[in-house]
């Protein structure tokens, strides 16, 4: 009976593909839509490739309010703003500030921890069906910092300890032993030895997608412009085509807002823009991802070379790439490593971020047959499989044994 239920999934980034696969495992008939080829140019293609199950401490925290002005003032810092976009982001910033109290920070941390803790086992369920051929490495992830930023590091370490997150503090000697090519500017660090990294996020996404197709899933390349209903059944529409489903899942990353606005949800999602460049052939300089915590950027050894990723830039979806942010990444990388050549592949991507730094997972508050899986900000790659698993259980009316109220779209009052 369940097998006949038709489900549409809009968006074939890591969220869409993982949702589609878990829904398929439940026996549903799944059609996946994307306006591009899967793994195109989306956030799921260009991210840092970190599987970061430890990263429960959010960016909404009391000390951020005092730190932000200095971060914005520094051209070498992790934060930037496109000033022509500030007025559009004011409502988001105000909501963000309301979420920076200690109590709200801990609410986010606990609810991120709940799903992050299940992230790797959920991926295992998908990975056991494909040939990974070394595309996922189990070498851990290192964070390093210098002494200017100790206060925030202490807060993070304390919260992780309270939540039971496994972390190993590193002395400068430990860091040198793990990554001898990093210049010794650092004061200390943390090692998450169970974290993993992708050697090529796009290839992993395509392998998962191919498995979905092999198991009978359908893919339609189409830009979905609107959603209406026929007797509660969602109809997805492009300019010229329409498809009717029993249930629908929206997994369009930050672009989900264009569709949820049409469903009168008013979900306050905006983007934190991020960048990457590659230093081709230089991935051998490090063995695992290294994050320079003070400067908010990371280096990951990938098939494409050394991928240098970072920056939080507030500037919406339409502003062009900022050359100054690319320059910032290059200078930061050269501060950490000698020998780097000319960079290649300047990329801008869009993190989908809610002001409380929790994703939206679950049914629409207005339409019971529409479900959401988006808004995973800096952690949407890590949280792909677990989000898909949760949504598939919700749609199959199975218990998840989790308290999911914190992720509901109804948490936002208009
Ligand atoms: C610089 C950077 C570094 C990051 N590093 C990490 C990291 O190391 N670890 C981590 O866990 N996370 C990381 N992230 C976050 C992570 O990449 C994102 O949260 C995640 O990829 C979002 O996945 P998604 O599937 O929700 O959205 P996306 O990857 O944006 O995919 C959405 C898809 O929907 C499609 N789409 C949109 N609108 C429509 C429409 N109307 N009709 C049809 N299709 C549509 C798009 O074409 C796209 O394919 C990083 C992000 C950035 C930008």
Image: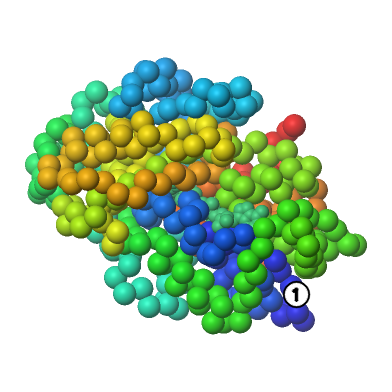
Q: Is mark 1 within 8 Å of ligand 1?
A: no
Q: Is residue 233 visible?
A: yes
Q: Quadrant of the C terminus?
A: top right
Residue 74 falls left or right of residue 273: left
Within 10 angstroms of label 1, few (less than 14), some, or many (20 or more) residues?
Answer: few
* Residue at 68% from the left image edge and 39% from the top image edge: 267
* Residue farthest along the right direction in this orientation: 231
Residue 352 in the image, given as x and y percentages of width and height: 55, 44
Residue 299 falls left or right of residue 408: left
* Residue at 78% from the left image edge and 62% from the top image edge: 240
For this rendering, which residue is in front, 391 or 117? 391
Residue 115 falls left or right of residue 360: left
For this rendering, which residue is in front, 135 or 365? 135
* Residue at 50% from the left image edge and 76% from the top image edge: 210
Above or below, 54 against 245 in this view is: above
- Element assignment for label 1: loop
Q: Quadrant of the N terminus?
A: bottom right
Write down the quadrant of residue 77 in the picture.
Answer: top left
Residue 76 in the image, given as x and y percentages of width and height: 30, 27
Write down the quadrant of residue 324 in the picture.
Answer: top left
Q: Which residue is mark 1?
A: 5
Above or below, 75 against 340 in this view is: above
What colour scheme has been applied to the protein in the rendered image?
rainbow
Residue 45 in the image, given as x and y percentages of width and height: 44, 56
Above or below, 189 against 304 in this view is: above
Residue 139 in the image, given as x and y percentages of width and height: 24, 59
For this rendering, which residue is in front, 82 or 138? 82
* Residue at 53% from the left image edge and 64% from the top image edge: 38
Q: Is residue 26 visible?
A: no
């Amino acid at each position: 009976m369940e097998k006949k239920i038709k489900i549409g999934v809009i968006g074939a980034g890591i969220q869409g593909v993982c949702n589609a696969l878990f829904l398929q495992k439940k026996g549903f008939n799944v059609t996946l839509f994307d306006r591009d080829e899967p793994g195109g140019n989306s956030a799921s293609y260009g991210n840092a490739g970190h599987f970061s199950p430890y990263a429960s401490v959010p960016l909404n925290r009391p000390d951020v309010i005092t730190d932000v002005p200095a971060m914005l003032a520094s051209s070498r810092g992790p934060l930037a703003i496109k000033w022509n976009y500030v007025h559009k982001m004011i409502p988001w910033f105000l909501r963000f500030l309301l979420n920076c109290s200690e109590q709200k920070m801990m609410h986010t941390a606990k609810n991120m921890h709940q799903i992050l803790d299940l992230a790797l086992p959920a991926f295992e369920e998908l990975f056991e069906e494909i040939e990974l051929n070394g595309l996922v490495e189990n070498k851990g992830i290192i964070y390093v910092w210098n002494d200017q930023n100790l206060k925030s590091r202490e807060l993070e370490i304390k919260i992780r300890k309270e939540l039971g997150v496994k972390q190993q503090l590193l002395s400068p000697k430990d860091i040198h032993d793990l990554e001898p090519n990093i210049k010794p500017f650092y004061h200390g660090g943390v090692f998450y030895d169970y974290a993993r990294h992708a050697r090529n996020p796009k290839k992993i996404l395509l392998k998962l997608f191919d498995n979905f197709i092999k198991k009978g899933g359908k893919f339609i390349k189409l830009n979905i412009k609107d959603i209406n209903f026929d007797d509660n059944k969602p109809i997805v529409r492009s300019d010229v085509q329409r498809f009717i489903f029993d249930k629908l899942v929206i997994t369009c990353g930050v672009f989900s807002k264009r569709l949820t606005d049409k469903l009168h949800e008013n979900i306050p999602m905006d983007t934190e823009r991020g960048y990457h460049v590659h230093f081709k052939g230089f991935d051998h300089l490090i063995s695992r991802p290294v994050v320079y915590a003070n400067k908010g950027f990371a280096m990951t050894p990938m098939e494409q070379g050394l991928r240098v990723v970072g920056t939080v830039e507030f500037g919406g979806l339409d502003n062009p790439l900022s050359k100054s942010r690319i320059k910032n990444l290059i200078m930061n990388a050269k501060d950490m490593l000698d020998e780097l050549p000319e960079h290649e592949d300047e990329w801008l991507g869009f993190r989908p971020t809610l002001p409380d730094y929790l994703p939206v997972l679950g049914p629409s508050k207005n339409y019971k047959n529409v479900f959401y899986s988006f808004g995973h900000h800096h952690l949407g790659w890590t949280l792909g499989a677990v989000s898909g698993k949760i949504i598939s259980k919700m749609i199959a009316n199975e218990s998840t044994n989790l308290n999911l109220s914190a992720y509901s779209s109804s948490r936002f009052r208009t």
